[in-house]
Image (cartoon, rainbow, N blue to C red):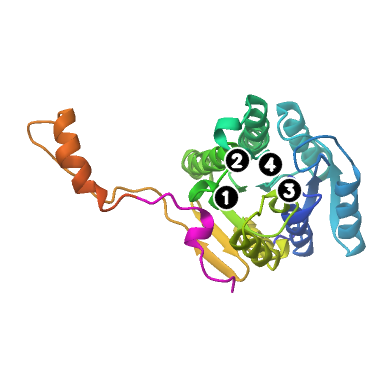
């Protein structure tokens, strides 16, 4: 499906990114395996994770090179693009997967925790996409696969920074799809359910939360990769969509659209909004759901 195509996968040293890189390579892609090698909180650096994935790809007969750049750095993002062009002479696919977690209840969240997560997830996705976009435009082809989360799409406790970043990525991905469609460039989002070291940091204090974590452990990162490869294939024409994967299930997620309206010919006052608009709209208000409140059934 990807014979000879050049693919950058960020955060590919472990977890979901690793399995995406492996499957991209097994389907003919030439892969730049990017991973800073930091902790789940984004601290430190280690070349071993990326190098190990490259070695595994090569051992299976694939083609790959390692990249140790930090997606939060525009210069490092530019370096990923330049490496692809220098080594392979092309770039066809970008998978923006790199991420960290610094969870905290909102009123206890520090500016440092906020900035770190926004920088890696949202700014990092922008940095890598921006570095590659001019090339995609000039060659009139290319594909972005961006990673969002149901923590943003639906909600979760203690993840204001992560949720905001992941919803920002949805807006970024849709904007790329709109702005670059004239150049045959596609951009989609995936919200994955999969056990990884990041998910492993989520607190589980109640029996219900512990049971949910155990269910997530059944969903391996390898389950995410097939959709990524399919979206990256040159004969795929899908763009501007949001998908969710949970074990063997693939969901197409909704996007915000008007669902109910009220009108008052003479205009609104604060009192008429209170007495008319809000009661009329209230039946369609959303509850304070978390991801687990919506996906209540066991993974299939």
- Distance between the Cα atoms at labels 1 and 2? 9 Å
Q: Name the residue beneath numbered marker 3.
A: 9
Q: Name the residue beneath numbered marker 2.
A: 162
Position of the C terminus by quadrant? bottom right
- Distance between the Cα atoms at labels 3 and 4? 19 Å
Q: Name the image quarter holding residue 87.
A: top right
Give the mark nearer the N terminus: 4 vs 1.
4
Decide which of 282, 86 is in the foreground and name it. Answer: 282
Asked whether residue 73 is drawn in magenta, I would say no
Q: Secondary structure at mark 1?
A: loop
Asked whether residue 296 is drawn in magenta, I would say yes
Give the mark nearer the N terminus: 1 vs 3.
3
Residue at image position (20%, 45%) is 279
Residue stretch in magenta: 286-300
Q: Name the image quarter holding residue 211.
A: bottom right
Q: Secondary structure at mark 3?
A: strand
Q: Secondary structure at mark 4?
A: loop
Note whether residue 237 is visible: no
Disc 3 residue crowd, few under 14, some 14–19, many 20+, Cα 10 Å:
many
Q: Name the residue beneath numbered marker 1.
A: 149
Decide which of 181, 104 is in the foreground and name it. Answer: 104
Answer with left or right where residue 272 lies relative to residue 175. Answer: left
Position of the N terminus by quadrant? bottom right
Q: Secondary structure at mark 2?
A: helix
In the rendering, at what x and y percent does residue 55 appear?
91, 55
**Residue 101: numbered disc:** 4
Labelled pair 1, 2 in contact (Cβ < 8 Å): yes
Residue at image position (57%, 69%) is 249
Labelled pair 2, 3 in contact (Cβ < 8 Å): no
Decide which of 78, 104 is in the foreground and name it. Answer: 104
Labelled pair 2, 4 in contact (Cβ < 8 Å): yes
Labelled pair 4, 1 in contact (Cβ < 8 Å): no
């Amino acid at each position: 499906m990807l014979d000879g195509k050049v693919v950058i996968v960020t955060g590919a040293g472990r977890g979901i990114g690793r399995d995406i890189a492996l499957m991209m390579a097994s389907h003919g892609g030439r892969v730049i395996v990017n991973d800073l090698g930091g902790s789940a909180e984004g601290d430190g650096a280690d070349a071993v994770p990326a190098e190990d994935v490259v070695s595994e790809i090569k051992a299976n007969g694939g083609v790959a090179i390692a990249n140790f750049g930090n997606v939060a750095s525009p210069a490092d993002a530019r370096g990923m693009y330049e490496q692809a062009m220098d080594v392979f002479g092309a770039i066809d696919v970008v998978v923006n997967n790199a991420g960290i977690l610094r969870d905290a209840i909102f009123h206890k969240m520090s500016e440092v925790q906020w900035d770190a997560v926004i920088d890696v997830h949202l700014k990092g996705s922008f940095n890598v996409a921006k570095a590659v976009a001019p090339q995609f435009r000039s060659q009139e082809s290319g594909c972005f696969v961006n990673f969002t989360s149901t923590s943003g799409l639906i909600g979760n406790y203690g993840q204001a920074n992560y949720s905001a970043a992941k919803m920002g990525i949805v807006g970024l991905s849709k904007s790329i799809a709109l702005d670059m469609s004239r150049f045959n460039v596609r951009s989609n989002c995936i919200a994955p359910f999969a056990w990884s070291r990041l998910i492993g940091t989520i607190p589980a204090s109640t029996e219900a939360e512990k049971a949910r974590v155990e269910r997530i452990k059944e969903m391996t990162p390898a389950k995410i990769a097939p959709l990524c490869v399919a979206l990256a294939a040159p004969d795929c024409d899908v763009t501007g969509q949001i998908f969710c994967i949970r074990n063997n299930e693939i969901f197409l997620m909704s996007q915000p659209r008007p669902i109910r309206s009220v009108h008052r010919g003479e205009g609104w006052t604060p009192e008429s909004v209170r007495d008319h608009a809000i009661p009329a709209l209230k039946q369609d208000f959303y509850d304070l759901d978390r991801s687990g409140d919506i996906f209540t059934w066991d993974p299939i």
